[in-house]
Amino acid sequence: MSRRWCRKLEVAILSFAGFTGLLFLLQNEKSRHDLKEAIEISSPIRPIVTEHPKPIAECRENVSVANLSGFAELPDHIKNFLRYKHCKEFPLLLDVPEKCGGPDKSYDVFLLLAIKSSPGNYERREIIRKTWGQERMYAGVHIRRLFLSGQVANAREARKINQLLKAETEENGDILQWDFHDSFFNLTLKQVLFHSWMEARCPGVRFVFNGDDDVFANTDNIIHYLLDIPGAGDEHLFVGQLISNVGPIREKWSKYYVPEQVTASNSYPPYCGGGGVLMSGYTSRTIYKESQGIELFPIDDVYLGMCLQKAGLAPASHSGIRTVGVRVPSSKLESFDPCYYKELLLVHRFVPYEMLVMWRAINQPNLICGKRLEVYQRL
Ligand SMILES: *[C@@H]1O[C@H](CO)[C@@H](O)[C@H](O)[C@H]1NC(C)=O
Ligand SMILES: *[C@@H]1O[C@H](CO)[C@@H](O)[C@H](O)[C@H]1NC(C)=O
Ligand SMILES: *[C@@H]1O[C@H](CO)[C@@H](O)[C@H](O)[C@H]1NC(C)=O
């Protein structure tokens, strides 16, 4: 199935599943419990927010790309990508240098949540802070959170939104913002900048969750899964929803359209859907090193596949990571049970209020979920 169709199917299935699931949950009103008992309190490492962008020479547009045959006919965002893809360094406008307690103490951070968030997505960030993205100690290990952001294109809008991000990070200490235009085709740039930031600030982090701000990540399950992985982050790990044997979409109307001028190759290396992946600190550092020698490619998840391939490492599949939705099994009522979500690590496309409702539901102390294995087998 092509990626395009996957996406359409994903939207259809998830809208249906999400809606019906909520009906189920709302009926369960009486069994709601206060979550405070279930969630441990944030640990005391308080990040300091600084705003001293290191001066970096402004990156010049590559005017020669206009010579590429067919350039004039390309959509504007692709023209822009080609003009600026050689630019890999941008000043940090908002930094949280102490996020991991400094490079030496960063070994104590077990899981760093690095969530890509467009500057305007305030509500999504707020709800993630309150639900699955809480900075906390769980099962004896530390979870830390960061949102990765750029700038909005419109200068007037940017001044406003930059005030918002500043206020948010003063309160929560959890935003990295770089001075580049936050757009779909700049997501790879955001990814690469994050790896380079990690190299400097948090080189010892054991594991990284890297995903979008519209996913629901069951961080409790993620921690249990990662605690069982040998090597505590010093060995290769890169898991998500594996996609292989696909190539660039050449249809102009698609969001994922990648023309010949960007890549002549008709195939992509195996990669994991970018909605959410888990990687070890080792693999994150490897990606950073490889990214130095690989030209930016506009689709961020494919780019990570390219970095892994160059390093001779393989991405892998985890059945609990559903960036293309939960398959709806035959018995309908049962399938909308929060237990489905309790067993998963990650599901794509949740709106903020759904995250809140689902997080509360799966944390109910009296939620009894049996048939654990069956859930995995059905997916
Ligand atoms: C490519 O573009 C540059 C800048 O516009 C121009 O100076 C140069 O002559 C062009 N080269 C070719 C091979 O067309
Ligand atoms: C500018 O674009 C041309 C045409 O694609 C390419 O050959 C050249 O290497 C690029 N220059 C830089 C600095 O990336
Ligand atoms: C990426 O960001 C740079 C710097 O702001 C900008 O010049 C470029 O147009 C952006 N690229 C895309 C594809 O949006």
Image (cartoon, rainbow, N blue to C red):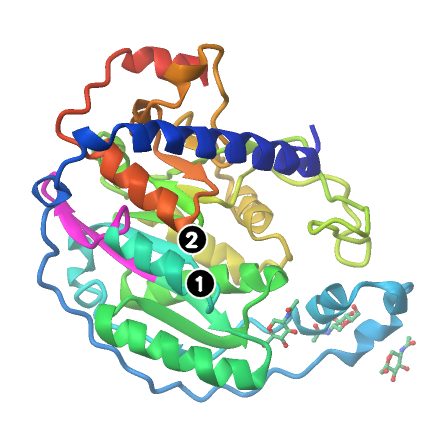
Q: How many labels does the image show?
A: 2
Mark 2, residue position: 213
Dot 2 amino acid type: Asp
Mark 1, residue position: 121
Magenta stretch: includes residue 48: no
Determine the secondary structure under disc 2. Answer: loop
Q: Is residue 230 visible?
A: no
Q: Position of residue 126 (x, y in %)?
A: 32, 60
* Residue name at image x 22 percent, y 52 percent: 134
Residue nearest the observer in this picture, 258 or 68: 258
Q: Position of residue 98 (x, y in %)?
A: 21, 70
Depth check, mark 1 against mark 2: the one in front is 1
**The residue at label 1 has a CB less than 8 Å from ligand 3:** no
Dot 1 amino acid type: Asn
Q: Where is residue 42 in the image (x, y as percent from the top left)?
A: 12, 56
* Mark 1 in CB contact with mark 2 (< 8 angstroms): yes
Determine the secondary structure under disc 1. Answer: loop
